[in-house]
Image (tube, rainbow, N blue to C red):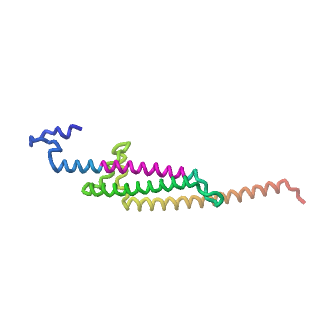
Amino acid sequence: MAAPTQQSGASGGNQNPTSNPTMSGARSEITCVSLYCRLGQETVQEIVAKTNEIFGVMKSMQLPNGVSPVNPAHQAKLQDLIRNSQRHFKRLRLLYDKCNQLSGGMDQSNAEELIPWKDGQDSLSDLSGLGSEDKVMNAKRERQELMEKVQSKNEQLRQVIERLRALIWDINTMMAMRYAPWP
C-alpha cells in the first residue's frame, strides 16, 4: 500500500496525503465513519445475542394456561432482556444517523463496488442493470409465453390420455366379447 505515497511527478513536492489539510480531514472523517460502522456491527451482534437469549427464556417458560403462574424469575429476566434489546436498537439508530451524517458527501451510487465478490469482476458485470424496466418487462413477457406453451402442452397431453383411455376401453371390450359365449 506504499505505492500511492511514492509517486514521482513533475511537482517534485511531498505527495503524502496527510500533508494536505483537506485530505487529513477527509481521512479522519472516514476513520470516524468506519469506527461508527464497527460499533454498529457490534451492536447488531449484541441484538442478535439478546434475541437468542429472549427466545431461550421463552422456550423454557411454560405457557400460561391458567393452572400454573409464570415463574417471576423468568418473567423478570425476559423483561430485562427486552429492555436491553430496546436500548441496543436505540443505540443502533443513533449510530446509523451519525454514519449518514458523516458520510453525507460520499458517493453512495457505487455501493456495488464495495462488495467483495468471490469470482471477481465477472460476477459484478452480470449484476449490472438488474433493475432496468426493459429487462423486467422482457422477463414477464417471456414468462407469460412459457406459461401459455406449458398450458397448450398440458392440453395436448390430456387429449392423448383421453384417446388412450378410449382405446384401452375398446380393447378391453373386444377381449371380453371374444371370450364371451354366444347365445
Q: Is residue 36 magenta?
A: yes
Position of residue 102 measured from the top left corner of the image (x, y, whole percent): 27, 55
Q: Quadrant of the N terminus?
A: top left
Of helix, strand and loop, which mostly describes the magenta segment?
helix
Position of residue 96 measured from the top left corner of the image (x, y, whole percent): 34, 56
Q: Is residue 29 above or below residue 13?
A: below
Residue 101 falls left or right of residue 137:
left
Q: Residue at x 24, y 51 (%)?
A: 29
Residue 116 falls left or right of residue 76:
left
Position of residue 83 measured from the top left corner of the image (x, y, whole percent): 45, 56
Which region shows up in magenta?
Answer: 34-57
Q: Residue at x 57, y 51 (%)?
A: 59
Q: Residue at x 36, y 59 (%)?
A: 132
Q: Is residue 2 above or below residue 53?
A: above
Closest to the observer: 99 or 130?
Answer: 99
Closest to the observer: 122 or 32?
Answer: 32
Residue 100 falls left or right of residue 138:
left
Residue 55 falls left or right of residue 134:
right
Q: Is residue 116 above or below residue 94?
A: above
Residue 93 is drawn in which quadrant? bottom left
